[in-house]
Amino acid sequence: MAIDRLQSYLKEAQSHVERLNNVLERLRPLYPLNIEKFSNLTSSQKDILDALAFRFSKLQDLLGSRIFREFLNHTGYITEGKTFLELLREIEKEGIIDIDTWSQFRKIRNLLAHDYPDEILEKIEAINFLIENAPTLIKVVKKIESKAYR
């Protein structure tokens, strides 16, 4: 049954990955974003930036709240009663993602989740970070798929 859940979660992740890849492709002409470009964004471009933050957050949440645990269960690691940090350490041992990178992703995601108008430069940095690092999050999904279904 854990495999069925893992497969289901990975299918959902794949949906986020496809949309994230589409968003990244559409943002390529804006990268790197700076204050001038940010000030002149069209409504459509702002929607694309929102989609980037949304898809990145959804994928990261799905990985952290469901996929990591199911993947570790699939490998035989006992997850019941373990903290997220313990699970993350095991994920790191598996070579999927390191704790520091995951923590950076959480920090950026949390920054973008709040809309503070006086923090434009931080927001621009965060958006550039997401554009640069979203492929790393996508690779996490691919690593789990390949390790789970070798």
Image (cartoon, rainbow, N blue to C red):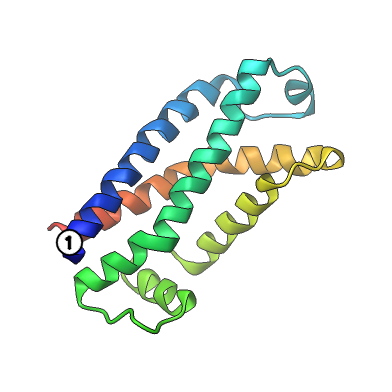
Can residue 5 be seen from the camera position used here? yes
Residue 86 appears in which quarter of the rendering? Answer: bottom left
Is 31 rendered above or below residue 9? Answer: above
* Residue 96 visible to the viewer: no
Residue linked to disc 1 = 3
Q: Looking at numbered disc 1 in the image, what kind of residue is underneath it?
A: Ile
Residue found 61% across the figure and 50% down from its top: 109
Residue appearing at x 24%, y 51% in the figure: 8
**Left or right: 91 with respect to 150?**
right
Q: In the displayed image of the protein, which residue is found farthest to the front?
A: 1
Q: Residue furthest bottom?
A: 81
- Residue 45, image x, y percentages: 62, 20
Q: Is residue 27 left or right of residue 115?
A: left
Q: Is residue 37 left or right of residue 94?
A: right
In the rendered image, residue 97, in percent from the top left (x then y), is placed at: 41, 62
> Considering depth in this image, is 64 or 93 the residue closer to the camera?
64
Side of 73 relative to 37 (left or right): left
x, y (%) of residue 53? 57, 39
Which image quadrant: the N terminus? bottom left
Q: Secondary structure at mark 1?
A: helix
Q: Horizontal and vertical percent for residue 126?
A: 66, 44
Quadrant containing the C terminus is bottom left
Of residue 111 and residue 139, the one placed in the foreground of this image is 111
